[in-house]
Image: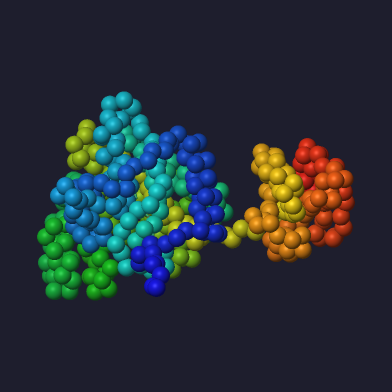
Amino acid sequence: MEKIRTLRGFRDILGEELGKFRDIEEAFRKYSTRLGFRQIELPILEKTELFVRTIGDATDIVEKEMFTFIDAGGDSLSMRPEATAGMVRSYLQEGLYATERLTKVCTIGPMFRHERPQKGRYREFHQIDVEVFGVKEPLIDAELIFMIRMFLDELDISRYHIEVNSVGCKTCRESFRGILLEFFATRKSELCEDCLRRLEKNPLRIFDCKNQQCIRVTADSPLLFNSLCDECRDHFDLFQKYVTGFGIKIEVNKRLVRGLDYYTKTVFEITSDDLGAQKAFMAGGRYDDLVEEMGGPATAGIGFAVGVERLAMLMPQKTEEPVRECFFACIGDRAHDYLILLLKACSSEGIPLKYSYEAKSLKAQMRYADNLKCDLVLILGDDEIEKNIVTLRDMTGKNQEELPLNIDHIISVLKNRLSP
Ligand code: HAM
C-alpha cells in the first residue's frame, strides 16, 4: 500500500533541528521579557479579508500565496501567511489601544504561504513575531535592531547584514508615484504582465518583482529614498543615529522593498550570505497607518518577524555533552515489582533510567543495555533479593559491586556515578 507523505512544502521537525528551534525560542524569551514584551497566541485561521486589507491585494502573498478556502458557512477563510495582520486585529478587538499607551507583544507559531518550495522556503514555516503599538519616535526602531542584535549574539550568529531603508509615508509616496509613472511610461513594453497590473494598482510593487527583465528596468528607476519628505528623512536620520549609538553597524539599501503593503518609513531585513537564495532570515518595519486603516485610532506600529527555519540553518552545530545513563536489568516477578519503585524514585530525582519492557533473560538485557550505550547497569534477580542486595555493573570498566537493596542508597550512588 502506498505510504502517505507530508504535503509539498510541509515538513516534520525533529532531532537536531527541533533542538535548535527550542534554543531559538529560549533565547528569544530571554530578551523579549527583558525588553518588556508579552506573548500572545493568535488563531491560525482568520477571515481572508483581514489579510487582503492589511498585506494588500496587489501583493504576491495575497494574490498567489494564501491557503484560502470557503468554509461550510460560505465564508472565505485563510491560513495566516504572517502574524502582523492578526496582531493588529487582536490589538483592536481586545481594545488594547484604550487601556495602554504602549503595547509590546510577541507571538511564535506556524505561518502558511503557497510558494514554490526550495531550501529555506516552505509552505508551512515558523515565525517569531514582535510588534510594538503606540510609539512613533525612531528610538523604538533602533531598540528593535538592538534586540535583534542581542538575540543573535546569544545564538552565536555573527555573519549577517542589517539592511535598512525608508519607504516613506503617504505624502512622499504620493509625490513619488508621479515620478515613477513617468519613468515606467517609456519602459512599459519591458515589464511582465503582473507588473503592468501593478503599474495601475500600486507601482511601488514593481520593485518586488522577481522577473529578471523587470529587475533590469527597476535598476534604472528613480528611488523613493531620494524623494522622502522632511519628516520621513528626519525620522530615518535619527534612527540611524540611535542605532549607531547602540554600536550596531547597519547598511542603507535604498532598493530594499518589502513584499507587504502596510509599511511606512523604516524597513529592514537581516540577511546572511550563508543562506543561499533565500537570504533574509528576519525582516520588518514600521506601519504607522495600519491601525487606523483597520478601523482603530491613529496609532504608530512597528515590528519584525524571525524566520525560524532560516535562523536554525545559521546556528552552529552543538557539541552535546554525552549523558551518562543507567539500565535496570531485572529478572523475575519480584525484581520486576522493584522496577516501578526505582523508576518513581529516579524520575523524581531527575535520573534517566532505561529498562526493558519485556521479560528477557539477563544476557539479552545486558546486550540491550550495551546497545543503548548505558554506562551503568543495576542487576536484580532472585539471588540478589534473597541477599537483600543489588549488583551495580560499570559498563566501561566492566567491574561490578554489590549495593544494599535500599532505594535511597541506590539513588545517591546513581546520582554520584552519573554526574558528568
Ligand atoms: P516577511 O518578510 O514576509 O515579513 O517574513 C519574515 C521572515 O519570515 C522572512 O525574512 C523569512 O525569514 C521568513 N519566511 C517568509 N516566508 C517564508 C517561507 N515561505 N519559508 C520559510 N521562511 C519564510 C513578515 O512576515 C512581516 N509580518 C514582518 C513584520 C512584523 N513586519 C512588521 N512586523
User: In front: 191, or 94?
Assistant: 94
- Identify which residue is drawn at 81% across, 50% down: 382
Which residue is drawn at the image coordinates 74% and 46% (left, top)?
Answer: 334
Question: Where does the image place residue 402, in percent across and percent down from the top left?
Answer: 87, 48
Q: Is residue 240 something one can see in this rendering?
A: no
In this rendering, is residue 213 above or below 61? below
Q: In the figure, is residue 146 to the left or right of 171?
A: right
Numbered label tally: 0
Residue sitting at the far top: 99
Q: Is residue 194 visible?
A: yes
Quadrant where the N terminus sits is bottom left
Q: In terms of depth relative to the viewer, which is nearer, 247 or 46?
A: 46
Residue 294 position within the rendered picture, expressed as x and y whole percent measured from the top left: 20, 40
Q: Please tell me in which quadrant of the rendered image residue 298 appears.
A: top left
Ligand 1, image quadrant it occupies: bottom left
Of residues 228 and 187, the one nearer the viewer is 187
Tell me if 144 is positioned left or right of 236 in this view: right
Q: In the image, what residue occupies the spot 40% across and 43% down? A: 107
Residue 70 image position (x, y, % from top left) = 18, 53
Residue name at image x 39 percent, y 57 percent = 125
| Most foreground residue, 232 or 78 | 78
